Amino acid sequence: MGRLSTGHGSGGRLSSELVSEILSSFGASALEQEDCAIPEKNLAITIDGFTITPRVFPGGDIGKLAVCGSINDLAMRGAKPKYLAMSLVAEEGLEKEELLSYMKSAGSVCSDLSVQLVSGDTKVVPNGQVDGLFITTCAVGTPLPVSNLGISRLEPGDALIATTSIGRHGAAVAASRYNLAAGTLISDCAPLWPLAKDLLDIPGLRSMRDCTRGGLGTVLCEWAEAASLGVLFDEKHLPVSPEVRSICDILGFDPLYLACEGCAVIAVAPEDVDKTINRLQAHDVSRDAAFIGYMTAENPGYVGMKTEAGGTRLVDMPVGEILPRIC
């Protein structure tokens, strides 16, 4: 069976295969591979772990990241976040002041969204048995009437919208880790419920997914494979900031696969594209929202990108780990 590698936690192909194997133990299908589960009418739930290094990065820290990450998974299924449970595993010797600074960041996001911390657990392990601090968050929310949003609703012809420029979290963390000058580049780490709730009454809203580990490219591959549809998008329509392009050029990364923590891809009926973009652009975190492409009936299970050079490039999930410990 082999041993796990960091690639199995990258959000790419190895992660997808491992998750599929784990789900098969529980009898779950590919269409159930959403980041948030809605097991019954009034309940939405998600859980995630955070091991980022450095723990403080331009635009946020591990506390803010942990809360936003779980809240965003609820938001993408149309569920209002209400409750949070948090588990901390800290290394002996971690400064208490540092830990509490992360808790204040987390608490600030919860306060802004009226999310209550209702349960938690704290462990401190001997020095060397964990790298500083790991946080696990479980978020619970209330699905709103349109909460059947998800992969199963995708249809040929659906338009795809990126809510903001891609790859900013991964690029900001990389720049911080490797001491690279990156100008005004900061992570896009932010809660997405405020913008998500403004879209829920759009009739043609099909599916939403935040582009975390593995980036936009991986989300599009997951959608294509799970829905047995094709995806075709245009490179020249991708919102990518000059700072992200610069970091990618220096480190040899592809912005398609860099992690985001405040960017989502949204599928809507083509007649609702303008309405969706207009509503997104009313929010500071999604002023760069842009139409990028379509779901198609052709080439089911595959993602193609029309390149600026004029050809079409096959986009697949990354196999290895691009940048470990980013979330």
Image: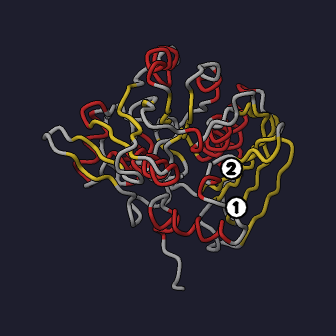
| Amino acid of disc 1 | Ala
Q: Which mark is residue 38?
A: none
**How many C-alpha atoms fall within 10 Å of the one at disc 1: few (<14), some, or many (≥20)?**
many
* Quadrant holding the N terminus: bottom right
Q: Earlier in the sequence, mark 1 or mark 2?
A: 1
Return the x and y of residue 28 as percentages of the image width and height: 68, 62
Q: Is residue 59 visible?
A: no
Which residue is under mark 1?
90
Asked if residue 64 lies left or right of residue 217, the reply is right
Up the image or down, 77 lies above or below 9; here it is: above
Query: Marks 1 and 2, Cα distance to the nearest angstrom?
Result: 9 Å
Local SS, label 2: helix
Question: Is the Cβ of the residue at disc 1 closer than 8 Å to that at disc 2?
Answer: yes
Q: Residue at x 33, y 31 (%)?
A: 239
**How many C-alpha atoms fall within 10 Å of the one at disc 2: few (<14), some, or many (≥20)?**
some
Which residue is under mark 2?
99
Task: Out of 21 and 246, give the one closest to the viewer.
Answer: 21
Asked if residue 312 lies left or right of residue 233, the reply is left
